[in-house]
Every structure is written in structure tokens, then in C-alpha cells.
Image: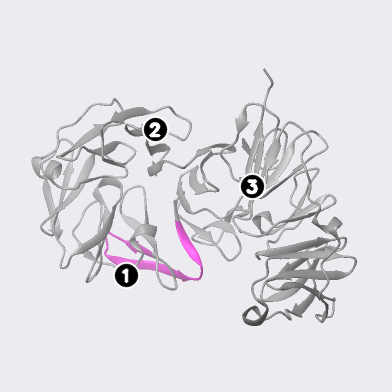
Amino acid sequence: MAFGPGKGSRLLAPGLPEVMVVSGDTRLWVNGSCIWEQRGDLVEVVDSAHLVGLAVSQGKTCIAWRTENGFRISAGVAAKGVEIPGARGVHVGVDWAVVDHGIERRVLCLADNSTPIVPVGARDARPKAWSAGRGVTWIDGGHVYRFKEGENTRLAGKTPGEVTSWTSGPHGSALFQTDRGVLGLGARGSLHETPDVDVKTARFSPDGHEFIGATSDGVTRWSLIDQREQNSIRGRLYPAGYADGPVLLDEDIGTLRAWGGQVMASGFTPCAASIHKTRLYGPGGTAWSVETGERLWQDSPLAADHLMATDGGVIQVDDRIVGFDLDGEVAFDLPLPIDQELDGPIYSTHWVDGLMYFEVEDGWIQIDFEGRRVGTDPPPVSSFDRPTLSGAWQFDEQTGLIADEHGPLPILFDGAALRHDGTTLAWSEDGLLCILEPSPTG
């Protein structure tokens, strides 16, 4: 599919990813039971159920999948790849992959499927392929070793404590979580202490000279060559990768942004969804035109478990009741007169003829637009009506799957609506929003 509004199948909002890696103009993320790969305006998507590894660097991609007989390694989400039968594990970079056969490890060169010879120490240990570059790193007795094709094994240093987890970057860079703190290793240089980052979140620069990582209060940018912090930012920011510089995912406003703050993409906000007439609210944290697929609000203020679309806008229910008008401006802000300890959790919400209905553990609560509890009657049955599909796509609410005559898509959705041109608008509460064109018949 293509990215943004237009004709054909489109991705309008990606939603909040579970994992995201950015390298140059390539973006790879996992969300909604699928793995998505975007290069420019083209987006390819496949089922991620058996995904076990991925690497992206400077236009190259490598993805590993578990199969019935072993593993499959592909140079992209839609590529057939190469089968590795009988393997117990695999670790991939974009140039080399390490295959675990139980007794020992072997290396697979992804350019020609050859098997380069690596030192015996690496084959007997648990080496990891460099995320880019033809080499492996391994740990033996606390000593960290690196091997690059065509060169001799080099000792990079010794960890002062037990390594509990670690990640391999490009050209021999790495980060090690130990019981005495985090250690960094650049593409050149020695082991050294770094800030206390979450090693699994780290994203390395393409040359392996620096990384960005999530800390307890934000993100840090650390030079592995100079062995010092270059900068840090506070907030709900998560490392995504490197384009012209570091790229961050800003969860507060649902954007992909450069380190300096420039917005690169939006629509990464999870939210409940609610549709009313020609407007859909929620995916990407904002409002959408059902007919044109265009975004109606510049901002993304929506991020709640419950939304109620109305004639005049949408009502968001979180720890308060906040109404937004058709332009996305706050129309009212009321306290929520429901105590979850006394009333239980809110299961669903409905707006009908000027009243808000909240389903809780013991029944229903009616609330007026002054924030008062005014009754316990349920909403009219007609308020439960949901948009249905009558075109080429059929939506199964129980499984979340949309299917046509060729079978179901791998993407999980929470709702769908038929558009006037025969395409389908489909969304999830992860913030995902797509336009689906009917598949060719025959």
C-alpha cells in the first residue's frame, strides 16, 4: 500500500508501534500483529507471528522468521528469503547472520549465502552478528572479543560484572547490561561506562560511533568514540534510529521527530475510535474524513480508552470528560463522576440525544453535560448500531480480521466502514488507520 491519502490501498496512520527501527529512508516497525516496512511512500506489510529478528542499516534490511523446520531469513518483509532447516536459533545483521545448530554456531553471508570461517572461540560461544558489517562479537569469561572478516580476532576488553543482556551494533559496536551498570563499545575504541540506558532500546549510528538510548527520564545521545554524553532530552521519547541524525518517537504527541525537534511523520498515537456520519475520530489521535481519507485536525489531542462522536465533535473520556468541537478545539472539560473503586471499570460509552451513557460493572450510569449523574437507564438499542461492510471486504468483529474472496488480511482491526467508492476504511485502537481497495477478482 501507499502512505497518505489518495487512491488505492493506503496507510493513513501507523498507530503506536511495539518496535520501530529507522535507517535513512527505511522505516521498519511491528504493530497490529504485523511487521511494516516503509521505503519512501511505499509500505509493505506481512504477518509478524513468527518474527524472531530484524536488522536495518543504510538501505539494507534483514528479517528472520521461525518456520516448521527451522528459520527463514529475508532481505525485506515481502522477500522469499533463504531457508535454514534444523537450526535452533538465529541472530541477524544486514550482512551476516549467526545460525545456532546447538553444538556450535556458523555464520551465513547474506550477499551470496556462503559460510565464512570464524574463529573456534566464536563458534563455541554465543556470538552475535554485527547489525552492519561482516563480523561477529562474543563474550568468553567476561572478555569481549570481536572478529572482522579478513582480520584477526581482537580483544575489546573485559566486563567488570556479569553480563545480563547485550545488543550488537554496526561494525563491532555494542552495549552491555551488567550487574554493575551499562558498558559501551564503539566501532573503534575500548569498553567504557555509559549512562544507565535500557540496552534493548538503543539505536546505533550507521558508523557505530554513537548511540541513542532511553533513560529513566528521557533519552541520551552518547559518543562511543569520545566516551561522553553529547546531549539529552527529557520526556516520553524513545529511540527509533538514524536518518540524517538521530530519530525519536515522541509518544506524547504521536510523532516521529529528529533530535532537533523537526517532525518527520505523525499518526503514532493509540486511541479508541468512534465514527459518526462522515467523520472518524481516534486513529493517530485525531479526526479523519471517512469519504476523502484526509486528516481534519492539525493536532492529535485524542488518546483515551473511550470516545463518543457527536454531531458537534467528539467526547473523550479518560480521568475527565473532555469535549472537542469539529475544529478540534476544547468545547468543555468536566470531572468524571465515576469512581472506579466504587462503580468498577468503564466498559463502554455512548452518546444519545444529549446524554452520555457509561456501562460499568453493575449496569449503566447516565451523565448530562454538566457532569451530573442523572439516571441508570441503558441507552436505546439503536445506539449500539455499528457500521457494517456490504462490499468486497467482510469484517469479523470476533477475530478482528477483514477478508475478501481471497482470504483474510494478516492485520487486526477493531472496526471498519464501507466508503462511497467501494473501498473500506479500517482502524484499530492501537491508532492504525488504513484504506483497503478490493482485491482483483479471478
- Which element type, helix, strand or loop, lies under badge 1? loop
Sooner in the amino-acid sequence: mark 1 or mark 3: 1
Examine the image and state in which quarter residue 163 appears.
bottom left
Most common SS among magenta residues: strand
Q: Could you say where residue 80 lies in the image, as x and y percent from the top left?
A: 42, 27
Q: Report the residue at 44% width, 34% height from top.
A: 76
Q: In which quarter of the image is the C terminus?
A: top right
Marked residue nearer the N-terminal end (1 or 2) = 2
Which residue: 77% across, 77% down? Answer: 333
- The three-letter amino acid code for the residue at tag 1 is Pro
> Which residue bears the numbered disc 2?
74
Residue beneath label 1, please?
A: 195
First along the sequence among labels 2 and 3: 2
> Residue 392 is drawn in which quadrant?
top right
Residue projecting furthest to the front: 362
- 284 is higher (above) or lower (below) than 52: below
Q: What stretch is highlighted in magenta?
A: 221-239
Q: Can residue 57 be seen in this view?
A: no
Residue at image location 70% in from the left, 64% down from the top: 306
Residue at 83% of width from left, 71% of height from top? 377
Residue 275 in percent (x, y) is at: 78, 54
Q: Is residue 228 magenta?
A: yes
Question: Would residue 116 appear left or right of 357 to someone viewing this image?
Answer: left
Tell me the tag on residue 398: 3
Secondary structure of residue under mark 2: strand
Whether residue 266 sits left or right of residue 28 in the image: it is: right
Q: How far apart are marks 1 and 2 (CA)?
A: 34 Å
The answer to the question of whether label 2 and label 3 lie on touching residues, with beta carbons closer than 8 A, is no
Q: Which amino acid does label 3 sit on?
A: Gln
Q: Position of residue 9 (x, y in %)?
A: 67, 35
